[in-house]
Amino acid sequence: ECDFNKTCDGVIIQRYKGTEMEVVIPAVIEDFPVVEIGYEAFSGTNIVSIVFPDSVKTINGCCQYCGFLTKVVLPKNLTYIPSYMFYGCTALKEFTLPGGISEIEAGAFAGSGLEAIEIPDSVKEIGSEYDDDGGFVGCQNLKTVTIGNGTKVIGAMTFSECTNLTAVTIGNG
């Protein structure tokens, strides 16, 4: 159950209104493909898991303050993790980034419960050199980070306030 808009390209999920805690977004609603997830569409809800269909091309920061979220399956064709996507998702302890991700935008995982993250070779940019909110700022449970060989830009504030961070491995070590 959700609010949605139909566009020429397909359906945009605007706001989740359901009560299910394990959400699987359908690939098609009323014969239209689901192509986009709107900003704050699931924010502040009690969902524990969310599966995005591969039909989704654009995801805006849609899961902020989902305090019970522990499992996320992103669409295979997604190329970036949007700004503030998982901001304040304190139950999100682990996360697997799909191999096609090329950018982790500002604040994408800020204040989340991540304990470790492995960033694949496909990621070229984490945050931006101009962003004040790093991709992982305030992740106080974050202990280890492994960054692949493809990363060219790591924003200055990317790991600020990660008070328990003890190991960062970049590239081949």
Image (cartoon, grey):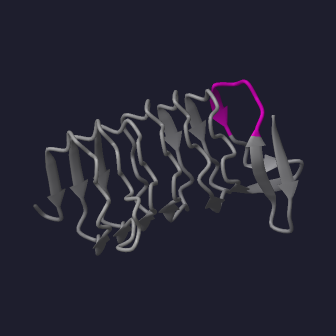
Which residue is at 55% across, 28% downward? 48
Which residue is at 83% across, 49% downward? 4
The residue most toward the left is 173
Tell me: residue 72, above or below residue 132: above
Tell me: residue 122, above or below residue 140: below
User: Where does the image place residue 159, in percent across and percent down from the top left?
Assistant: 28, 54
164 horizontally vs 16: left or right: left
Residue 172, quarter of picture: bottom left
Which residue is at 62% across, 57% downward? 60
**Residue 23 falls within the magenta-colored stretch:** yes
Tell me: residue 69, above or below residue 13: above
**Residue 144 falls within the magenta-colored stretch:** no
- Give the residues in magenta: 16-24
- Viewer-closest of 43 and 124: 43
- Quadrant for the N terminus, please: top right
Which residue is at 52% across, 30% downward? 67
Residue 127, quarter of picture: bottom left
User: Where does the image place residue 44, in percent across and percent down from the top left?
Assistant: 62, 35
User: Where does the image place residue 131, in percent across and percent down from the top left?
Assistant: 41, 68
- Viewer-closest of 138 and 36: 138
- Viewer-closest of 163 and 99: 163
User: Where does the image place residue 114, in percent across and percent down from the top left?
Assistant: 35, 39
25 horizontally vs 139: left or right: right
- Quadrant for the C terminus, please: bottom left
